[in-house]
Amino acid sequence: LDNCLALADLGASINLMPLSIWKQLRLPNLNETKMVLELVDRTISKPTGVAENVFIKVGKFYFPADLVILDFVADPRVPLILGRPFLSTAHALIDVYEGEITLRHDDQSLTLKCEGDILMLEALLNNDPEPLSKDYLPTLHRELKFIEPKTQSKEDEPPKVELKELPSHLEYAFLGNNREWPVIIAKDLNFKEKTDLINVLKTRKKAIAWKLTDIKGIDPEFCS
């Protein structure tokens, strides 16, 4: 394994390596562990073992680290997670303002720029895949296909309502096409008032009861 990106995570109390990477490196036998990990999705996972004193090269420095080996599908961009133990060993100094992380060994130091990762994060937050997209966001360039839903949910199906004769001061308005989703409104509203009212009602269709069974809190048993 010539080069490998890693995620420096202050929130992680361990250094984590996928089992697949460990097999590629052909490291010595793993030490057994009784450690149990609770993952982000609240699932419990037991590591395969711990690889002790593995030297990790960062720039010109080699830092020893104990790696917890876990069988999981890692992010191919950053398969290794280096937590607080590694950052402590490397005497890491993180400058958030300058976007830099400095690793120190004896009287020497190595400063790494985090600018690329910050730009990638900003691009994702702004929904703008242009900055560094070819290097950092290759998956965003894949063609996306829009697929129409095959079936309509019951909530989207217009109710079958019998239109009865109304008093002279009322009239029907329709929230859908083909005289679907009828509502009763005042007849003396002007065009703008009717349009505004219908637009509001369209956004609140779920709150309208076309049948007794649609009324929240009414037991369908009593509706016949």
Image: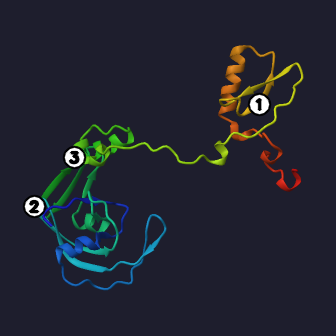
Residue 87 in the image, given as x and y percentages of width and height: 26, 63
93 relative to 183, above or below: below
Residue at horizontal 23 percent and vertical 74 percent from the top: 22
Q: Is the residue marked by circle 3 packed among few (<14), some (14-19), or many (20+) residues within 10 Å?
A: few
**Looking at the picture, which amino acid does disc 1 mark?**
Val
Q: Quadrant of residue 59?
A: bottom left
Q: Which residue is mark 3?
A: 135
Q: Earlier in the sequence, mark 2 or mark 3?
A: 2
| Residue at x 52%, y 46% (from the top left corner) | 149
Q: Secondary structure at mark 1?
A: strand
Give the residue at mark 1.
Answer: 183
Residue visible at 71% across and 34% down?
Answer: 181
Tell me how far mark 2 sits from mark 3, CA to CA.
24 Å
Question: Dividing the image into 4 quarters, which one contains the N terminus?
Answer: bottom left
Residue 84, position as x, y percentages in the image: 31, 65
Relative to residue 188, is residue 151 drawn left or right? left
Mark 3 to mark 1: distance in Å?
Answer: 54 Å
Residue 190, horizontal then vertical, whole percent: 74, 13
Secondary element under disc 3, as helix, strand or loop, is helix
Numbered badge on residue 60: 2
